[in-house]
Image (cartoon, rainbow, N blue to C red):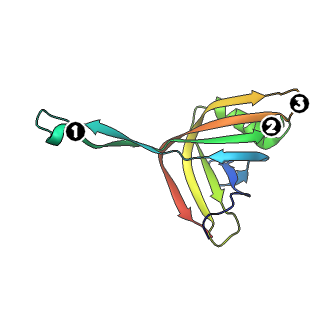
Amino acid sequence: MPGKDAFGTQLLRDTNGAGTFAVVANVSDLSGPARAREAIEVTTHDSPDGYREFIKGLKDGGEVEATIYYDPGNTSHQALDADFEEKDLRDYQLVILPGEADEHTWDFNALITAIGDAYPTDDKIERTVTFKISGKPTLTATG
């Protein structure tokens, strides 16, 4: 099969710092982790054929972005506000294809760097949350 349906993907947060995860409600879109790696230029006057040369630099775990149909009374949405305010990093998970044989989970430690709310006159309230990953995110087959 040339692709998978992303429907059902879940965002979870560690509720107590001890690996007890709870689903964040009403997530409509998720993206990430958007990992990156620095390219360190090492070009010299005798680099072959006049092309720049590079070596591998440090890696960045990237970011995860979530769009949520925001409900200010929802406890999982209130928890994200608290996560933004706290000083410590928190563990989060993205569960891809939950309940299927090909289920995979991204585990990552992150801080919330941005929360933005939108209140359109003719549509639902939305919240966008950006998680900056600290360290290496890990993808594990969990199905």
Q: Which residue is mark 1?
A: 51
Q: Percent position (x, y) of residue 78?
A: 77, 36
Q: In whole angstroms, how far apart are the C-alphas of marks 2 and 3? A: 15 Å
Which residue type does callout 1 highlight?
Answer: Tyr
Q: Quadrant of the C terminus?
A: bottom right
Residue 139 image offset from top left, x and y in percent: 53, 58
The residue that mark 3 highlights is 122
Quick one: quadrant of the N terminus?
bottom right
Drawn side of residue 85 relative to residue 124, left or right: left
Residue drawn at 68 percent across, 50 percent down = 11
Q: How many marks?
A: 3
Can the viewer see residue 100 in this picture? yes
**Drawn side of residue 125 relative to residue 115, left or right:** right
- Pinpoint residue 56: horizontal percent, then vertical percent: 30, 45
Is disc 1 placed on a helix, strand or loop?
Answer: loop
| Residue visible at 28% across and 37% down in the picture | 40
Looking at the image, tell me whether mark 2 or mark 3 is earlier in sequence order.
2
Kind of residue at disc 3: Asp
Q: Nearer the viewer, residue 6 or 127?
A: 6
| Residue 18 appears in the rendering | no
